[in-house]
Amino acid sequence: MEHHKLDSIDLRILTELQANGRITNVELSRRAKITAPPCLRRMRALEKAGYVKGYHAELEPKLLGFEVTGYVFVGLSSQADADLRKFEEQTRAWPEVRECYMLSGEVDFLLKCVAKDLSSFQSFITGTLTASRNVASVKSSLVIHSSKNEPGVPLDVR
């Protein structure tokens, strides 16, 4: 399935899956306005083509003891490909880092991090992140509260 061949049924399926990955095929087919067998075939084809990257549960961090969310802007000393890849590999090993984005502009990476408390967040920043080879600068901002958290992309379904 190529990117430009998505039809309105495919977009409805993707919209519903994005909103609720646990939706049953019967309910999904009803909302997509097709019968269950072709709906399941389309859903599997969309997964195989890479439109659906995976399914997961969205957890409540505070109930699990993670009181702090912070965004960290990281500048590296060297932007050579090998050094950029090495830093990305490091971030995958740090459980506090939940998202990592390579950026263009003033900083090289943006990290979304979680921690049990402010002291744990500070320990990660000073003991792990800034102590890493090739890290030249670190600036962080703590999240006060979230006004919007809408994962995915805005699909235009008519």
Image (cartoon, rainbow, N blue to C red):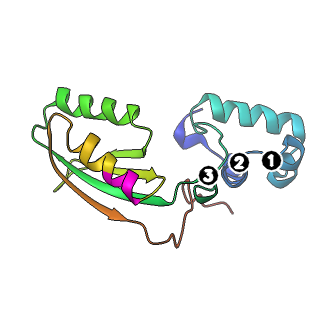
Numbered badge on residue 64: 3
Which amino acid, by three-letter code, is at mark 1? Ile
Is 53 displayed left or right of 39 in the figure? left
Please name the residue shown 57% across and 37% down the image.
53
Query: Label 1 near label 2: C-beta < 8 Å?
Result: yes
The earlier-in-sequence mark between 1 and 3 is: 1
Name the residue that disc number 2 marks.
17
> Alpha-carbon neighbours of circle 1 within 10 Å: few (<14), some, or many (≥20)?
few
Please name the residue shown 87% across and 34% down the image.
37
Give the percent coordinates (x, y) of residue 76.
Answer: 15, 43
Label 2 to label 1: alpha-carbon separation: 7 Å
Give the percent coordinates (x, y) of residue 150.
Answer: 57, 61
Label 2 to label 3: alpha-carbon separation: 26 Å
Label 1 to label 3: alpha-carbon separation: 25 Å
Which amino acid, by three-letter code, is at mark 2? Leu
Which amino acid, by three-letter code, is at mark 3? Leu
Give the percent coordinates (x, y) of residue 23.
Answer: 80, 47
Q: Dot 3: what SS? A: helix
Q: Which residues are magenta?
A: 118-122
Please name the residue shown 48% across and 53% down the image.
116
Quarter of image, res 72: bottom left
Indicate which label's residue lies in the foreground, 2 or 3: 3
Is 97 displayed left or right of 21 in the figure? left
The earlier-in-sequence mark between 2 and 1 is: 2
Quarter of image, res 130: top left
